Image (cartoon, helix red, strand yellow):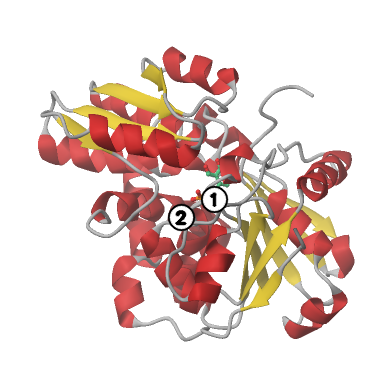
Amino acid sequence: MAIMEYLNPGRAPYTAQDRALIGTEHARQARAHFRAHPAYRPTPVHTLPGLAGTRAVHVKDESGRMGLGSFKALGGAYAVHLLARRDGPGVTFVCASAGNHGISVAAGAREAGAACVVYLSHDVPEAFARRLRGLGAEVRRDGGDYEAAMAAAEQAAREPGRRLVADSSWEGYTDVPLEVMRGYTLLFDEVAESALEAPTHVFVQAGVGGLAAAAAGYVRDRWGEQPKIVVVEPEGAPCLIESARAGRPVRVQGSRTTLGRLDCREPSLIAHRLLSHLADLYTTITDDQAADAARLLAGHGVALSDCGAAGAAGLLALTDGTRAAIGLDDTSRVLLLGTEGPVEPK
Ligand SMILES: Cc1ncc(COP(=O)(O)O)c(C=O)c1O
């Protein structure tokens, strides 16, 4: 399969309707919640001057996020907190996960004193299952891919007293995943509140697109239409790029990828809708490019998994024509999300 770069012809301004879904106000609310959390502190940003022909690349390093290993700690746990406050004790939270979302939901459930069941497909590393059990969650293995695990979780959540906390969304199921995405906006707020100048470009790796859409909503609300937002997907699971091309969410066949947490064949409906007018560019990377990017960043003292370095891979792989099209040059200030630390020692 060829590497793809797709300049979004549907790019249009951020609207009041978008703002009602996701923007800086949601980050403020998420901050108000997390500020009281004993494990909360802003994650660091590593600045790498001159990388990839830019003025500077800034890597927001989410590996230490609340001791849970990824930015996902801000999403699922936040949605669980809001649901537990509304529904009271006695609810069992159910989710499917490629790993990190489950950890966040399990942590949130433990804090709320609620039970939690996490569905993992058979290819999710056992390291995640161990961490989930350590957080008090019951782990169930079901299905060969993320979508199959999601179907199992959805079915299980139909039982009375259970609530599905998905990081993806579809027709008729958007409220909870929207809160998950609103939780993620806090990490962009931390960047905005730091001493850094506004980024000119933001590269975000995507699975179902929740993080990328949170980035898009926050960035447009805070910094306007100028910063270029680039969505980076594995070539084996290009569901957002194909959905953007099709003008509706589509399921892709895809192929094997080692980028497990980005291995999603169907986009989140809300994420697709937001990105289809707020993102400037969609691009894909190979597994090898992600591994090379992780090695390069490790050489600069930034330790990430290949998934965590996928945004950097997108930046490094961009063709000259596309770099020019998005105005990427030696004056650019690029924000990357180091979404996850090393998962299993290599
Ligand atoms: C480490 C890491 N990076 C990026 C992503 C992509 O997030 P999303 O599925 O919201 O697009 C995930 C999702 O699980 C992840 O775990």
10 Å crowding of disc 2: few (<14), some (14-19), many (20+):
many
For badge 1, the amino acid type reads Gly
For badge 2, the amino acid type reads Gly
Which residue position holds label 1?
Answer: 207
Q: Quadrant of residue 148?
A: top left
**CB under 8 Å between callouts 1 and 2?**
yes
Q: Nearer the viewer, residue 199 or 35?
A: 199
For numbered disc 1, what is the local secondary structure?
A: loop
Q: Quadrant of residue 288?
A: top right
Quadrant in which the N terminus appears = bottom right
| Residue at figure coordinates x 37%, y 82% from the top left | 15
Task: Specify whether 333 is left or right of 34.
Answer: right
Q: Residue 252: x percent and y percent?
A: 54, 56
The reply to whether the residue tagged 2 has its Cβ within 8 angstroms of ligand 1 is yes
- Give above or below for 244 relative to 285: below
Task: Specify whether 168 is left or right of 324.
Answer: left
Which residue position holds label 2?
Answer: 210
| Residue 286 shows in the view | yes
The reply to whether the residue tagged 1 has its Cβ within 8 angstroms of ligand 1 is yes
For numbered disc 2, what is the local secondary structure?
A: helix
Q: CA distance from mark 1 to mark 2?
A: 8 Å
| Residue at figure coordinates x 57%, y 18% from the top left | 126
- Give above or below for 174 relative to 146: below
